[in-house]
Amino acid sequence: WELCNFCPHGHVRPILVSAMAAPVGVGDVAVATASLGLAPDLKKRIEVMAGHVARSGPDFERNIRAKNASSAQFTFLVGGEGADYYQALLRAHKTQAAAGGGVGGGGGGGAVPSGPTAELAELLRRWPEPRSPPLGPDMERHFAELVVGLEHMASRDAVQAGRHWVEANIGAVAAIAGAFARRICVLQTCAHRLHLLFLLHDVLQTEFARQEPFRPIITAFRPCLLWILRPAYQLAMSSSSPGDEPQKVLKLLSMWEERGILGSTEAAEMRLLTTAKDLPALPSLAALTGPVGSLAARLTGLNPGLLQQVQAQVLAQQAQQQAQTPAPPPPPPRPTPPQLLSILQGVPLASSPLQQAQVQALLPPPQGFTGLWQPGMQQQQQQQ
C-alpha cells in the first residue's frame, strides 16, 4: 500500500510505507462498528496508517498529516471520512499492546500479530549493513585524529577541516563512509557521536549545494547513513535522561529529506530502522555464499530481493577474481619463409659441416623448383 507524499518541490509522489503490513482484524466491536460503510481501499489505507502510528508514535502521524494536508486520501487524519475507524484502531492497538498482543482478528477470535518483525526484516534487506573497504594506515590515522578533535565540541574549524579532508580524498570516499559507520559505534558519549554527525551533515549538504550532476560523496555515503544514524540514536535513547539528543539525530534525517539529499521513501525507511529498539537477525552473506557448489541449496526459500543481492555480490566477486588473474601471454607468431630467410641472413655463419647442413635444410627452395628439396641443393644451385 502506498501513501501519497509531497516532495520538497511540491510534486506528488508515492511513498512505500509498508509492503509487509498484515491486515488489521476487526474482532473488537468498536472497530467493527466504525468500519461499516467504508470503501475497501480507504479502509485498508486507514489500517496501514494506524499500524504504523501505533509502532512509530505520533511523530509519524504529524509528519504524514503535514505533508498531505491537501490530499483527499488522508482526510481521516483531520476528522474526515474514516476518522472514527482510525481512532478506534489506534485505541485497539494501544489496548492490545498493553496486553502483549496485536489487534484481534475476526472469525477465530485469536490474536493476529501486525508483523513489525517481518516488516523490519524486509527493510533490512533493502538496507543491508555495507561492507566497505578499509582505510589505509595513513588515512586511518588522520581520520582518527579528526574524530578525536570532535570529542568535546564540533567547532567550525574542526568541521571544516574534516570536510576538506573528505573532499581531498574523494577517491577513497567509499572507505571513508565505512570508517564513519565503524568509528561511531565505539564512541563513548552521545555528544561525541552527534559531533561526528554534524561533520557528516556539513559534508553532505556542501556537495549537494554545488548542484553538480555527479555527487560521489552522497552516493558513497547513502548506503551507510542508516548505520551511522542508528548507533547515535540508540545510545541517546539508552541514557537515563535522553534529553533532546534523539530528536537531534532524527532532525538531521529530516533535513536531508527536506533538502533532497534523501528521498521521502528512503528517509521513512531509515527512520523506522533507526528508531526500532531491536532489529531482526538476517542470514550473513558468508553463510549464504559458502562453497560455490552449495550456493543454490543455501539460497532456496530466500526473499527474492535478498536473493538478487547475494547473486549480484557473488558475480561481482567472481568478476574481481578473474580481473586479478593475469592473462597468459599470446604465443609468438610462426615466421613465414621470407621472414625466416631474413632471420637466417643475420645469423653468424655456421662453423661445422653439420651446422651448415642444418642451415641449408632450413632455407626454402628457389621459386619454380619441383621435386624433393634436400640439404646441399642450395649450394649446387648457386654453383650451377
Image (cartoon, rainbow, N blue to C red):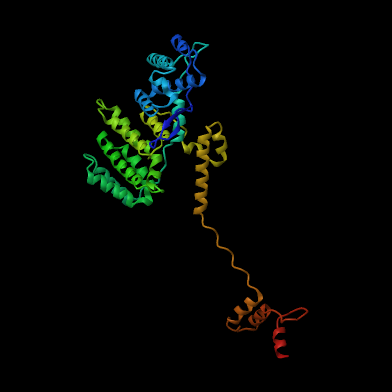
Q: Position of residue 222 (x, y in %)?
A: 39, 40
Asked whether residue 157 appears in the rendered view, the answer is yes
Asked whether residue 116 appears in the rendered view, the answer is no
Above or below: residue 155 compared with residue 21: below
**In the drawing, does residue 220 fall left or right of residue 1?**
left
Residue in the image at 64% along x and 82% along y: 356
Q: Residue furthest right?
A: 371
Q: Position of residue 140 (x, y in %)?
A: 32, 48
Q: Position of residue 328 (x, y in %)?
A: 55, 60
Q: Residue furthest bottom?
A: 384
Q: Position of residue 119 (x, y in %)?
A: 45, 27
**In the drawing, does residue 244 fall left or right of residue 55?**
left
Residue in the image at 52% along x and 38% along y: 308
The mark total stands at 0
Above or below: residue 320 compared with residue 191: below
Q: Quadrant of residue 256?
A: top left
Q: Quadrant of residue 260?
A: top left
For the C terminus, the quadrant is bottom right
Q: Residue furthest top?
A: 29
